[in-house]
Amino acid sequence: DQQVKQNSPSLSVQEGRISILNCDYTNSMFDYFLWYKKYPAEGPTFLISISSIKDKNEDGRFTVFLNKSAKHLSLHIVPSQPGDSAVYFCAAKRNYGGSQGNLIFGKGTKLSVKP
Amino acid sequence: SQTIHQWPATLVQPVGSPLSLECTVEGTSNPNLYWYRQAAGRGLQLLFYSVGIGQISSEVPQNLSASRPQDRQFILSSKKLLLSDSGFYLCAWSAGMRAFFGQGTRLTVV
């Protein structure tokens, strides 16, 4: 049972345009969401997060939108740059410890930004 | 600042051989520690987590085990590797809402 779903395994975007990566979740108890970026043969690095009390969080070129009623979040990158090419993982967690507090990841979306 | 060390970076092991991957964290105390595996097309799968010394919880049944002999040390082991154990293994720590990952170990079982 996949609680965090990234239904697009890959996405190709032209440099300068907007990249939109989508993520859906099934567990309504999730209350914190994160995006990680991963280059090949490296560990994921934290990119941006959002609490369930918000519907938008912006950090430079990166914006995360949360639609709680639809159990959907998206990451917008604008403008996209070739260095953004990587695998992006969506993750969710419940805001307390124990097993319920662990990060649950989606399968990732490979973003390719073409020059 | 906190850092996480994971080694080795790559490992090729024959089927049936043992495994020991080590992870250490610096600059923090009593972190939650995690082992994840990234297998092809399957995202990041949580294998084990630990909230303290000697406290290990397993998320999925498997051929692997984990131990936490010291506060900032987390070890992933196997007595006999299977071909299906191949993958990219990631250690992570958290002390709040985010998890911070090591550089990963690429394990190939041949």
Image (cartoon, rainbow, N blue to C red):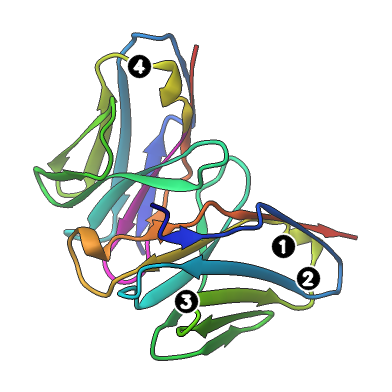
| Mark 4 crowd level (few <14, some 14–19, many ≥20, 10 Å Cα) | many
Which residue, given by chain and number where applicable, does mark 3 sit on?
A71
Looking at the image, tell me whether mark 3 or mark 1 is earlier in sequence order: 3
Which residue, given by chain and number where applicable, does mark 4 sit on?
B81
Label 1 to label 4, Cα distance in Å? 36 Å
**Can you tell which of label 3 and label 1 is closer to the viewer?**
3
Q: Residue at x 28, y 30 (%)?
A: B62
Q: Residue at x 44, y 23 (%)?
A: B84
| Mark 3 crowd level (few <14, some 14–19, many ≥20, 10 Å Cα) | some
**Can you tell which of label 1 and label 4 is closer to the viewer?**
4
Dividing the picture into quarters, in which one does residue A33 lie?
Answer: bottom left
- The boundaries of the magenta stretch are B88-99
Looking at the image, tell me whether mark 2 or mark 3 is earlier in sequence order: 3
**Residue A102 vertical position relative to residue A28 in the rendered view, above or below:** above
Instruction: State if disc 4 and disc 3 touch (CB < 8 Å).
Output: no
Disc 1 marks which amino acid? Asp
Label 1 to label 2, Cα distance in Å? 7 Å
Please state if B85 lies on the left or on the right of B34 as rendered. right
Number of marks drawn = 4
Please state if B23 lies on the left or on the right of B58 as rendered. right
Q: Residue at x 37, y 50 (%)?
A: B4
